[in-house]
Structure formats: C-alpha cells, structure tokens
Image (cartoon, helix red, strand yellow):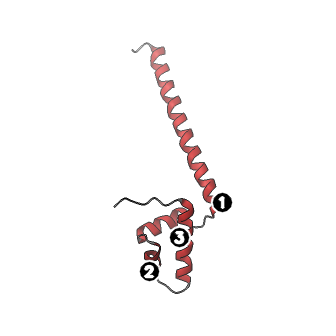
Amino acid sequence: MPKKRHKPEEIVAKLRQVDVMVSQGHSVADAVRAIGVTEVTYYRWRSEYGGLKSDQIKRLKDLVAENARLRRAVADLTLDKQILKEAASGNW
C-alpha cells in the first residue's frame, strides 16, 4: 500500500476539520480517524503547520525551496574553494 503525500494546503484543511470536530464534542482520536490519518501524524502536522493559513503555507514552501537552493550553492562553493586551496598548495 503506497503512502499518500498530502499537500500542505490539504494538511491545513484537515487540521481545521479536526478542530471543528473536537469543538463539536468528538474526541481527538475519533476526529483524527475521520480525516484518515494516525494520531502521530496529526500531532506532527499540528506541531509543523499548527497556526498557519494558506497564504503562509505558500510562503513557507517558497522559503524551503530557496533554502535548499542556497544550501546547494554553498556546498558547491565550499567544494570549489577546497579544490583551489589544494591546487594552490601543490598537494596533488
């Protein structure tokens, strides 16, 4: 059975569903089962996406992508620097 990847927008919507169901008197366990995830997944999502709105989710995705791009750039530049340092010292 393949794992389903939820998009951040779907996660926020499901967290809101659980909040509504809990406010209506359902237990957290019942509400989590109704959205089709485990309690562990629910609490992990809540810690990561807890108070975010959909526009903030889009900004978060953009920042994550930019962060990954910058990390790759720093790694490449660090490698280039090490190669040039070794070449300059004559240790082939």
Q: Residue placed at 51% from the left, 67% from the top?
A: 46
- Residue 55: horizontal and vertical position, in percent? 66, 59
Residue under numbered circle 3: 14
Q: Marks 1 and 3: CB-CB under 8 Å? A: no
Say above or below: 33 vs 47: below
Q: Nearer the viewer, residue 83 or 51?
A: 51
Rendered image: mark on residue 17 = none
Element carrying mark 1: helix
Q: Secondary structure at mark 2?
A: helix
Mark 1 and mark 3 lie on one chain; the one further toward the N terminus is 3
Is disc 3 placed on a helix, strand or loop? Answer: helix
**Hey, what amino acid is under mark 2?**
Asp
- Characterize the local packing of mark 3: few (<14), some (14-19) or many (20 or more) Cα atoms within 10 angstroms: many
Q: Nearer the viewer, residue 24 or 80?
A: 24
Marks 3 and 2, how far apart at CA: 13 Å
Mark 1 = which residue?
Answer: 55
